[in-house]
Amino acid sequence: MILIQDNFLSTAECNKLIRFYKRNKHLMHKWPEGDPGPCAYRTDITDTTNPFMKKILLRIESHAQTYFKSNLKIDWAELKRHEPKSSHQFHFDTASKRTCLASVTYLNTLSSGKIVFKEGLEVEPRAGRSIWFDGKLYFHGVSTTDKDRYTVPCWYYEP
C-alpha cells in the first residue's frame, strides 16, 4: 500500500522546519558523500531534543502506526534539502535490514523533484503532503528538481 495524505503538516509547520534547516546549515552533511553534485544535504533528526521536531516526528510515526502496523517505530529520520538539478536514482531502501516502511513529508511545493515509482506513480511535492510506502517493496527514486526541495524522510522498523 502507498498512502498519500495532503495537508499532513500546516504551511506554518513546513516553513518553521525550512527556517530551522537554513539556520543550521553547519549541521548538514552532503549526500551521497563524495558526489560532485548536484546532490542533497541532510542532518539526522532521529534523536532530536528540539521539542517542535519531536512533536512532528511523533505525529508522522503515529500515522504510520495507524495505517500500517501499530508497533512501528522511526528508525531514522532526516531533515533534507535536494539542491537544484539533483535527483535520486531508482532504488530499494536497503540502508538497514530491519527497515519495513518509509515516508517522505514535503516541506515546499514544486513542479519537479517528484517521488517516482517504477510502477508509474509520480507524487509531486506539495508543502505538507506526506507519503508512506514500503521502500523494500516499491522501486522508487526522485526526479530532477529545478529548485531546492525540502523534505523530512523517515524509515521505520518493527521492534
Image (cartoon, rainbow, N blue to C red):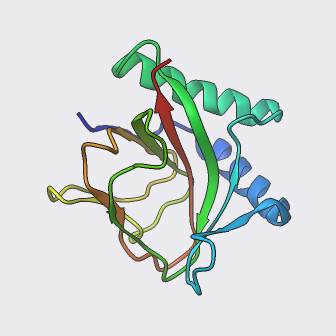
From this viewpoint, which residue is outermost toward the bottom? Answer: 36
Can residue 70 be seen in this snapshot?
yes
State the residue lying farthest toward the front: 97
139 relative position to 10: left or right = left
* Front one among 126 and 59: 59
Whether residue 115 is visible here, answered yes or no, is no
Residue 4, image x, y percentages? 33, 39
The residue shown at (14%, 55%) is: 119
Name the residue: 57% across, 80% down: 35
Q: Is residue 38 above or below residue 45?
A: below
Q: Quarter of the image containing the N terminus?
A: top left
Q: Position of residue 146 (x, y in %)?
A: 47, 80
Residue at the extreme top of the image, as rendered: 70
Q: How many marks?
A: 0
Q: Position of residue 157 (x, y in %)?
A: 47, 28
Q: Is residue 153 above or below residue 37?
A: above
Residue drawn where x is 81% and y is 60% of the image: 27
Left/right placement of residue 74 relative to residue 19 reads: left
Q: Is residue 106 left or right of residue 19?
A: left
